[in-house]
Image (tube, rainbow, N blue to C red):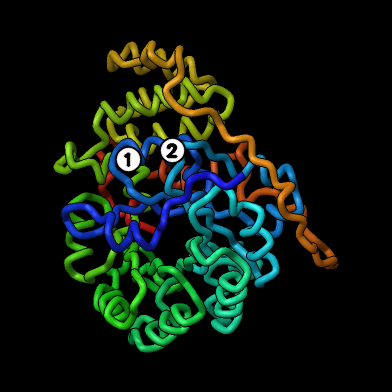
Amino acid sequence: MDRERCDILELLNGGKSSDGFLRVAAPMVRYSKLEFRRLLKKHGVQLRFTPMIIADSFTRSEKARQNEFTTAEDDIPVIAQFAAKDANEFVNAAQLVYPYVDGVDLNCGCPQSWAIAKGYGCGLLKNPELVKDIISTTRRTLNEHISISVKIRLLQHASSRTTVEFARQLEMCGATFISLHGRTMWQKTSEPLNVEAIRDIKDALNIPLIANGSVKTWDDACTLHKQTGADGVMVARGLLSNPALFNMKYKNATVTPIECVQDWLDIAAEAGENLHFLTFHHHLTFMWGAHLKRKERLEFNSFTTKEEIFNFFADNYNIKPTTQFIEKSYPPYTNCSYDHFQPEIKDVNNVEDCTSSWNSNTKGKFFSEFSEELDADDDCSLGNSFFADM
């Protein structure tokens, strides 16, 4: 059942780019799906994460597993990120997904209020002992060769001391690596990244550290690496606006190259119904929205089918899905079976019907804010502060 597995620690230590750091795509709710991971891989991203998945829902619901996780033979390396409130939730989900991924990651970095209210994401940072228990329990349970990582934020803005100590303890608990966003949970993305704190934490660890925050261009990534010495640079919103950000062929590009848009159309055409229309449409808005005048955006946002979008790009930019996709370019989707593990599910009161951390039929807060910003400024650039990394 187990597929060929990538050694994430070896990748971090020896698979870095010529510029000295691993190119990493952050987990993004709604958007880090298999199809987008394929696009990122083609354009130089070396390590990719799934969207944040609610661990308890993934364990309890076949529907959640089908909706939240898809993979294929070419989806290597990939790390599944889970939101969990305790070790039982995280370990159960990790054991279920284990055959299909190269690692599992605990989200302690999501600052959204709904996540914190439910005890997920940054809410876990209020209880460091619980985070340590989750990591140590998972390390005792899973095969020693699988990566177990944590994505965190700074615990304090004024001093790195508490975060340094916390990171050291996670290392002792068995974490393979740590991803660190250089802001606290209370800071806005408009506030400066604390690169000194990231450097302090990197210097204190014997395991790799991936730095995250405020990377919008290739030069930003190189600068963050030089300032912090991080083993990898993780990007979220910058890769939404330009999935070719890490592609050396386009390293001086300030917007998404048309060739990257072409690749996305090809991937979408082959994926068919496996790629939800809104997800497909949103990605193109992030990539290409700044090129469109208000009238064109209104037309583009009125589309309800992929065919309309294909025709739009064919008519306006002379690109369309290539005929080679009649024969299929990518391996088929893996038919994931979870019969290898039967989790012991604790009976709890008031279990929520939370099969997904998002609703695929709604636009979502992130996309809505992005659209409003475009409407407010017809000459806006996707390099503006809105795309400061999460």
Name the residue located 17 percent from the left edge and 66 percent from the top edge: 226
The CA distance from mark 1 to mark 2 is 9 Å
Q: Position of residue 63 (x, y in %)?
A: 72, 42
Q: Position of residue 311 (x, y in %)?
A: 41, 13
Does residue 320 lie above or below 164 as drawn? above
Front residue (pair 135, 340) = 340
Name the residue located 14 percent from the left edge and 42 percent from the top edge: 252
* 382 lies left or right of 311: left
- The image quarter containing residue 180 is bottom left
Front residue (pair 368, 163) = 163
Name the amino acid, label 2.
Phe
Residue 36 is tagged as 2
* 331 lies left or right of 285: right
- The image quarter containing residue 333 is top right
Q: Residue under circle 1?
A: 243
* 309 lies left or right of 382: right
Pointer 2: residues within 10 angstroms few (<14), some, or many (20+)? many
Residues at discs 1 and 2 in contact (Cβ within 8 Å)? yes
Q: Position of residue 367 (x, y in %)?
A: 47, 43
Name the residue located 31 percent from the left edge and 16 percent from the top edge: 319
* Viewport quadrant of the N terminus: top right
